[in-house]
Image (tube, rainbow, N blue to C red):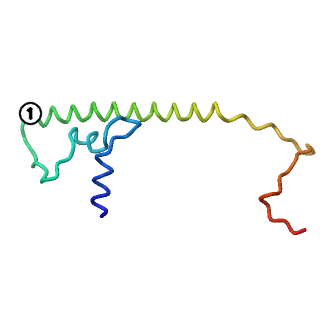
Amino acid sequence: WLKIAQFSYNIKQSSATGKAPFEITRLYFPRMGVEPGKSKNEAAGNMVKDMKSVLDETHKALFKTVEQMEDKAERRHSKAPNYKVSNLVWLDTDHLKLND
């Protein structure tokens, strides 16, 4: 079951990158049969260059997504006030276990 779950995850398109993890690392979708063997032709070198460019694009897209998420989180949160010793504050004890 683990192999089926892994296969299902690797072919699912990511909302952050727009591509499946398998497609990013291999530049094609997986087949249900045997993977092809290693090749010593020029096309293999070209494929390596293509894979590098796809990985670089994916890397940029993921970091852009991280930045967007950080910006959104920063905009939603306000800064905490500066508390000093002797300041009076209200405490909510609903979630504290106190003895009498």
Query: 59 or 17: nearer the eye?
Result: 17
Disc 1 crowd, CA 10 A, few/some/many (<14, 14-19, 20+): few
In the rendered image, residue 41, in percent from the top left (x then y), is placed at 6, 37
- 67 to 14, vertically: above or below: above
In the rendered image, residue 17, in percent from the top left (x then y), is placed at 37, 35
- Left or right of 51 in this view: 41: left
Label 1 belongs to which residue?
42
Query: 41 or 93: nearer the eye?
Result: 93
Residue sitting at 33 percent across and 50 percent down?
9
In the rendered image, residue 61, in percent from the top left (x then y), is placed at 40, 31
Residue sitting at 87 percent across and 69 percent down?
99
Q: Residue farthest to the bottom? A: 99
In the rendered image, residue 77, in percent from the top left (x then y), is placed at 67, 35
Q: How many marks?
A: 1
- Left or right of 62 in this view: 89: right
- The amino acid type of the residue labelled 1 equals Glu
Indicate the secondary structure of the residue bearing disc 1: helix
Placement of the C terminus among the 4 image quadrants: bottom right
- Left or right of 75 in this view: 91: right
Q: Residue farthest to the left? A: 41
Placement of the N terminus among the 4 image quadrants: bottom left
Residue sitting at 88 percent across and 47 percent down?
90
